[in-house]
Amino acid sequence: MTIQWFPGHMAKARREVTEKLKLIDIVYELVDARLPLSSRNPMIDEIVANKPRIILLNKADMADTEKTNRWLDYFNSQNNNTKAIAIDAHQGKGLTKIHSLSKELLKEKWDRMIAKGIRPRAIRALIVGIPNVGKSTLINRLAKKNIAKTGDRPGVTKAQQWVKVGKELELLDTPGILWPKFEDQEVGLRLATTGAIKDTIINLQEVAVYALRYLSEYYPSRLHERYGLEEIPEDVVELFDAIGKKRGCIMSGGYIDYDKTTEIIIRDIRTLKLGKITFEIPTE
Ligand code: GDP
């Protein structure tokens, strides 16, 4: 992550989002479909309060489809004011649903306006989310043009404008940037696995070990296939060594080159060489 979040930044980010909420009808909360809870802001429910909301599970192209469907059920069963859909902002997939779902969620409000004789206007929306979930990509996709990215720092603002998305929808061109729940170490490791946190500020080897542990529990066959392992050692360090050996990451003296092995594992995960992986499963 390019941001170092401090309490002052968080307070300011929250204030900025709260100000923007006054201007809009609906919130599009962007999360990463591979880790829908870890990629959320911990105070999002409190911040958004009772505004209608669509949770957009972005980067669905990289997530495990079966688990994405479970996440959609999970979010869709929570409350009537909140709906969830899976999208791929990069390729522009699933985006037409955003519009129809927004209309659905705002139908009552619009009907009330019409009943009072107020002419219906475009629905106004705001995209919010933690850094790297794809906010700018989505804005650009919806706007069908390139809107300059705001500095990924809370407090760095530019004059905001409405971007037209068709005739019936308008989007604020600057997203609400909120912080992740980084005080939880597992959340940090999950975010790091997907590359949402800058590699220079984390211990990548720890991330690789964390990911391997998860993969051997939930996706053992992927490890078999990718690394040609007959058996998956139960001990994660042994597994790490076995992958290093298979990949020829050996230093003089026959020792495993941990840095190189780490690099291979992380790259394989991020480039989908181990297939589409979801790192979190909804608990009932
Ligand atoms: P922001 O910090 O929330 O504005 O995130 P960006 O829009 O800058 O996106 C972060 C990275 O994720 C970029 O490299 C995007 O190309 C990538 N990205 C965004 N959406 C998707 C998606 O749906 N699928 C994939 N595979 N990559 C995406």
Image (cartoon, rainbow, N blue to C red):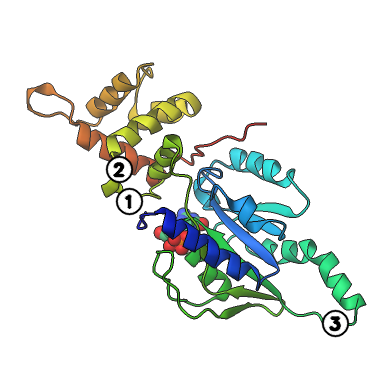
Asked if the residues shown at circle 1 and circle 2 are in contact, with their CB atoms under 8 angstroms apart, the answer is yes
Between disc 1 and disc 3, the foreground one is 3
Indicate whether 204 appears above or below 242: below
Point out the image quarter for the N terminus: bottom left
Residue type at the position of mark 1: Lys
Q: Secondary structure at mark 1?
A: loop
* Residue 8 visible to the viewer: yes
Q: Which mark is residue 202?
A: 2
Point out the image quarter for the C terminus: top right
Spatial separation of the CA atoms under disc 1 and disc 3 = 49 Å
Binning the other alpha carbons within 10 Å of mark 3 as few (below 14), some (14 to 19) or many (20 upward) gives few
- The residue at the far right in this view is 115
Q: Which mark is residue 32?
A: none
Binning the other alpha carbons within 10 Å of mark 1 as few (below 14), some (14 to 19) or many (20 upward) gives few
* Residue 90 visible to the viewer: no
Residue type at the position of mark 2: Ile
Asked if the residues shown at circle 3 and circle 2 are in contact, with their CB atoms under 8 angstroms apart, the answer is no
Residue at the disc numbered 1: 198
Spatial separation of the CA atoms under disc 1 and disc 2 = 7 Å
Asked if the residues shown at circle 1 and circle 3 are in contact, with their CB atoms under 8 angstroms apart, the answer is no
Residue at the disc numbered 3: 118
Residue in the image at 83% along x and 83% along y = 119
Residue in the image at 65% along x and 42% along y = 69
**Of label 1 and label 3, which has the lower sequence position?**
3
Residue in the image at 62% along x and 61% along y = 28
Q: Could you say which is closer to the camera, residue 193 or residue 17? A: 17
Q: Secondary structure at mark 3?
A: loop
Spatial separation of the CA atoms under disc 3 and disc 2 = 54 Å
Residue type at the position of mark 3: Ile
